[in-house]
Amino acid sequence: MTILFYRLLLPPLARFPGPRLAAISRWYEAYYDIILGGQYTSKIAELHRRYDKQYGPTIRISPHELHIIDPDFFDTVYIVWMSVGTSITGLMMPLTVFGSVNNAILGHDAHKAHRNAIAPFFSKPNILARENLMIQNVHKLCQHINELFEAKNSFNLGAAISAFTRDNANEFILGKSYNEIQLKDFGVGLSLISGGAGSFWRIKKHVRWFGPASNSIPVGWMMKVADDGTKSFFRYLEQSEQDTRSALDAASSSKDGKAQKKTERYTMIHQIMDSNLPPDDKTFARVHEEVATVTGAAYETTANTLRLIFYHVYSNDKILQKMRQEFSSFTSSKLLTLKELEHVPYLTAC
């Protein structure tokens, strides 16, 4: 009762409007996420319609969170969010660059060391040196879409984009090609589960012991009870773990790793092994966590952005025609490089 009384009346968030049940417990959110299958986002929109006219664009959606529907406030809240850090309890990867921000034991110094170890790998010159990877995958994607079109088969463009970004991320970071671009359905099940769909991730978010418990269960057992999307995710994790171990062995035994820095064989794992990190930070367990976190962060964020762009381009004929007109001025049939694309004004604006 003391906790309920405190959450309702005493904390700084108490002055903001919102459902009392949401202020008392995260189980209000869990009901919409788990029982109703991920509907809390829609519920938040409904709450804003209910409270905005009288109270403004800020509502309380949990004992510890506010939701703001004011675009003009984005810069302010983003700066505050970045300075405070983010909660990654659900990810349970405290040894990574992302996880060490909030790790009370490791803290700032570990975060800085882990970040500095991989930052050069993501520099613009290093990405440009591997631009051919992305160009090859663009060709594969276009070829597969043309084949589907000629066969008069419909396809999921969103899944195609996710497969494209996953293949790019895995090849660039891990040096491994999974060729999901060429799958008939573009691996749509993995795309859905990676984007946060499915009950597995929602349960992990609200039932804190579920994540550690599920991690201790053999993958084979989990595969027997999981849905198709979750099974594809576990298969991907198994393959990623195996490939990370192989790449780590290769990087550890490589004598000319630094000489390969501008080649496609030089992976983020090589970058970590060549860094000044202590041996404890170069173990398989930590490197695998880093690879899993960075690849996961790389592909779905990029895919979401591309899907949003494609939606607006293809939903607005004026935008589409103007973009096509801009590209019609290029006489060469070859794909443009990033340096060339950066000087295409309307594309850049889009």
Image (cartoon, grey):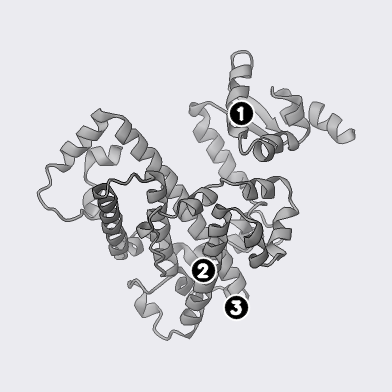
x then y, percent, for residue 246: 49, 78
Q: CA distance from mark 1 to mark 2?
A: 37 Å
Residue identifier under label 3: 279
Front label number (1 vs 2): 2
Image vertical order of residue 140 relative to residue 346, above or below: below
Give left or right: position of 47 versus 323.
Answer: right
Residue identifier under label 2: 239
Taking the spot 48% from the left edge, 59% from the top edge, the residue there is 295
x then y, percent, for residue 186: 40, 54
Task: Specify few, some or many for label 2: CA neighbours under 10 Å numbering under 14, 14-19, or 20 or more.
Answer: few
Q: CA distance from mark 3 to mark 1?
A: 46 Å
x then y, percent, for residue 285: 61, 71
**SS class, disc 1:** helix
Q: Is residue 94 visible?
A: no
**SS class, disc 3:** helix
Image vertical order of residue 306 relative to residue 99, above or below: above
Q: Quadrant of the C terminus?
A: top left
Taking the spot 59% from the left edge, 47% from the top edge, the residue there is 198
Q: Earlier in the sequence, mark 3 or mark 2?
A: 2
Q: CA distance from mark 3 to mark 2?
A: 25 Å
The three-letter amino acid code for the residue at tag 2 is Gln
Task: Specify few, some or many for label 3: CA neighbours under 10 Å numbering under 14, 14-19, or 20 or more.
Answer: few
The reply to whether the C-beta atoms of the residues labelled 1 and 2 are less than 8 Å apart is no
Give left or right: position of 186 versus 209.
Answer: left
Q: Which numbered disc covers residue 44?
A: 1
The three-letter amino acid code for the residue at tag 1 is Ile
The reply to whether the C-beta atoms of the residues labelled 3 and 2 are less than 8 Å apart is no
Seen from the viewer's position, the closer of residues 328 and 75 is 328
The three-letter amino acid code for the residue at tag 3 is Pro
